[in-house]
Image (tube, rainbow, N blue to C red):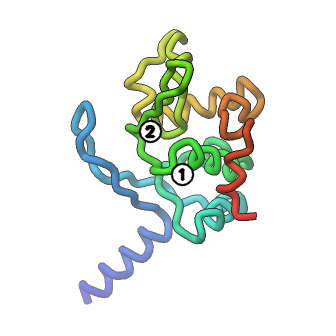
Amino acid sequence: MAAAILVGLVYWFTSVYTVSWQSPVRIHWQWPVVIAERIRSKDAEEARADQHGRRLSAWQQYSCRKFGADCRIALAIQRAENASGKCESYHYNSDGTLDWGYFQINTVHLQRPGLNLRDLLNCKANIDFAYQLFQEKHGFTPWSTYTSGKYLQYLGR
């Protein structure tokens, strides 16, 4: 009887939430599991299809909540910028700047008051700032993978 209840509880939990793993060690200790509410929208389903049916990670789910109808393009840009999907990643640019975190935010933005490198390495803060840039620029033009069209290869069209 207890096993049936446990199976039912696990089934319900995984139908409502998505679970992803993250490194338990960063600059500080963090819980190695990220749990986010599962999004059930047309855009999220199309983004999932773009990944050949693989479930969206918790950070991808969070991105879809932020970007809404633009979720699919946002995730294609994220994968073009940072294919591993790791929050602690960085990339050197030919102009001497660095791109940091989940959406590969350029260090030129560190000149903004209140933004620091720790924020760019935090997945949630990185996604929040990417969405802020998206709103400020009225689109995805701050990302070179968008302006070059590289993100298109991550759309399953």
Q: Which residue occupies the extreme bottom position in the image?
A: 1
Q: Name the secondary structure under disc 2.
A: helix
Residue 117: image location, x then y, percent: 41, 22
Task: Tell me which corner region of the image, top left, top right, bottom left or bottom right, holds residue 128.
Answer: top right
The image shows residue 22, relative to residue 124, as above or below, that is: below
The residue that appears at 57% across and 49% down in the rendered structure is: 79
Q: Name the secondary structure under disc 1.
A: helix
**Which residue is nearer to you in this view: 80 or 49?**
80
Q: Which residue occupies the extreme front position in the image?
A: 94
Numbered mark located on residue 60 in the image = 1
The residue that appears at 73% across and 39% down in the rendered structure is: 148
Amino acid, disc 1: Gln
Q: Give the mark, 1 or 2, whose residue is nearer the N terminus.
A: 1
The residue that appears at 37% across and 51% down in the rendered structure is: 34
Task: Tell me which corner region of the image, top left, top right, bottom left or bottom right, holds residue 120.
Answer: top left
**Which residue is nearer to you in this view: 9 or 87?**
87
Label 1: few (<14), some (14–19) or many (≥20) C-alpha neighbours in 10 Å: many
Residue 121: image location, x then y, percent: 40, 32
Distance of label 1 from label 2 (alpha carbons): 10 Å
The image shows residue 4, relative to residue 13, as above or below, that is: below
Numbered mark located on residue 123 in the image = 2
The image shows residue 52, relative to residue 22, as above or below, that is: below
Numbered mark located on residue 12 in the image = none
